[in-house]
Each structure stands twice: as C-alpha cells, then as structure tokens.
Image (spheres, rainbow, N blue to C red):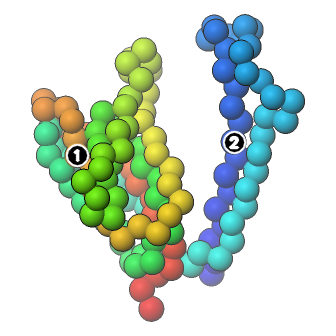
C-alpha cells in the first residue's frame, strides 16, 4: 500500500506575537507538494539519556528516503555516518509552552543518530522515517 507524503508550507514573519506588524507575508502563503510511491514508514519514540548519543531506529524501512525528528532538548542530528552536526535548538523564548525543535529531511538516508547536548536531562521526542520496506 503506497504512502502519501504531503508538505504544506506557510511562512509568515512579524515583529509581534499577534502577527499585526508583518515583515513577510506573501500573497500565496501556502505551497503544497505531494509525493506518492513510498511503501513503508516507521514512527518511533525517542529517548536519549543526558549527554548520550543514540541511533534512530528505521524499523522495517531499508531504503529510507525521508526523516522527520521532533525533540524537546537541544541536540545534534547526524546522518549517513557524517561527523557534521545538524543542530536542533529548542527556542529559549518559548520553552515554558512545550516548544520543540524539529527537522524534516528528504534524502537517501542510510543511518541517523541524535546526540543529547543536555548533560543533566534526558531528551524525548519522536521520529518517522519513510521509504521502501525490507522485501
């Protein structure tokens, strides 16, 4: 059974939290991209101990074509065995409201790992990979 991935992007930037002093607000604020044809997905719960690094489990998906990660602590995301860090930073101004750091990648991914930068608290979150399952 094919999986449909649908992206809807709406970007608006304003000087105030109510959105009254707009700096960027295009006439067509939504862009939609629909991709069909993936046959597998693996949602996972993340839990990374303070200061630790954990691999993201791909479940039964072997040919991963995309990754979504959402976490509650600052961390580094690394993909495909690279030592290059992709920083995910929870906005300090809204942490009281349950703010999260998020990453959405569309690429061929062979491995992924999360490094928890908080030395005193565990990181929790979710990840989803999609692509083609193990035959």
Q: Which residue is mark 1?
A: 115
> Is residue 23 shown above or below 52?
above
Name the element at disc 2.
strand
Residue 3 image-quadrant placement: bottom right
Q: Residues within 10 Å of mark 2 (few under 14, many from 20)?
A: few
**In this view, 71 is above or below 108:** above
Res 112 visible: no
Kindly identify the residue that appears in the image at 63 percent across and 8 percent down.
Answer: 16
> Which residue is painted at 59% across and 75% down in the image?
38
Given residues 109 and 52, the one toward you in this image is 109
Q: Taking 126 as reference, is 35 left or right?
A: right
Tell me the quarter of the picture where residue 109 sits.
bottom left
Question: In the image, is 9 to the left or to the right of 89?
Answer: right
Specify which label sits upstream in the sequence, 1 or 2. Answer: 2
Q: Residue at x 38, y 29 (%)?
A: 90
Residue at image point 30% right, 46% down: 85
Image quarter where the C terminus lies is bottom left
Q: Which residue is mark 2?
A: 9
| Residue 58, position as x, y percentages in the image | 36, 69
Q: Can residue 115 be seen from the camera position used here?
A: yes
């Amino acid at each position: 059974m094919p999986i449909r991935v649908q992206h809807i992007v709406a970007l608006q930037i304003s000087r105030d939290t109510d959105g009254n002093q707009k700096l960027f607000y295009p006439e067509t604020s939504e862009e939609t991209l629909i991709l069909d044809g993936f046959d597998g997905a693996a949602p996972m719960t993340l839990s990374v101990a303070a200061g630790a690094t954990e691999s993201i489990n791909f479940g039964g998906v072997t040919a991963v074509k995309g990754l979504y990660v959402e976490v509650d602590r600052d961390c580094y995301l690394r993909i495909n065995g690279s030592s290059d860090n992709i920083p995910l930073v929870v906005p300090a101004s809204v942490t009281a409201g349950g703010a999260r750091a998020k990453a959405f990648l569309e690429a061929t991914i062979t491995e992924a790992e999360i490094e928890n930068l908080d030395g005193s608290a565990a990181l929790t979150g979710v990840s989803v990979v999609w692509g083609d399952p193990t035959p």
